Image (cartoon, helix red, strand yellow):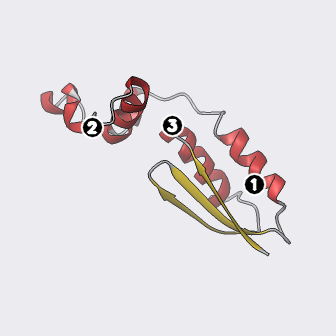
Amino acid sequence: MIVARTVHIADPLARANVVEALAGAGAPVGVIEVTRDGSAVTVRFDDAITPSDLIDDLVAIESVLVPEWTPNDLALEDAAAIAAAGLGDPDLDADRILEAHLGTRS
């Protein structure tokens, strides 16, 4: 049976890890498609080939084990989303990041 799982992962680096684990070179054979929409990651897979528990475990592991990064590795939009979530300010966006206006970051 084809199954779809959608998870919401706020951290963009963790989200990238999950997408890579599910769609990259070492992805489970039963994975048919992985899509991203904002913080949502949806994976469609054949559970006759890849058990649901494996998908759930990969999501759990990859969303916690995030590689070390430098500030320039993070897109301004992603940095703004993290700040907005942490500060509880849904109106905070990349236009309000000072470095973008100073040209010290792109």
Residues marked 3 and 2 touching at CB (< 8 Å) = no
Label 1 sits on a secondary structure element that is helix
Q: Residue sitting at 64 percent across and 39 percent down? A: 63
Q: Element at badge 2?
A: loop
Q: Nearer the viewer, mark 3 or mark 2?
A: 2
* Label 2 packing within 10 angstroms: few (<14), some (14-19), many (20+): some
Q: Residue at x 48, y 41 (%)?
A: 12
Q: Position of residue 51 (x, y in %)?
A: 84, 61
Q: Tell me the SS state at disc 3.
A: loop
Badge 3 crowding class, 10 Å Cα cut-off, few under 14, some 14 to 19, many 20 or more, is some
Three-letter amino acid code at disc 1?
Answer: Ile
Quarter of the image with the N terminus in it: bottom right
Q: CA distance from mark 3 to mark 2?
A: 15 Å
* Residue shown at the point (81%, 53%) measured from the top left: 54
Q: Disc 1 to disc 3, how far (Cα)?
A: 19 Å
In the displayed structure, would residue 34 be above or below residue 82?
below
Q: Is residue 66 left or right of residue 70?
A: right
Location of residue 94 in the rendering, given as x and y in whole percent from the top left corner: 26, 37
The residue labelled by disc 2 is 93
Mark 2 and mark 1: Cα distance apart in space = 32 Å
Choose top left, top right, bottom left or bottom right for residue 71: top left
Which callout, 2 or 1, points at the residue further toward the start of the chain?
Answer: 1
> Which residue appears at 21% of the width and 31% of the height?
96
Disc on the earlier residue, 3 or 2: 3
28 sits left or right of 5 in the view = right
Badge 1: residue crowd in 10 Å (few <14, some 14–19, many ≥20): many
State the mark number for residue 11. Answer: 3
Q: Which residue is mark 1?
A: 55
Q: Which mark is residue 44?
A: none
Of circles 2 and 1, which is in front? Answer: 2
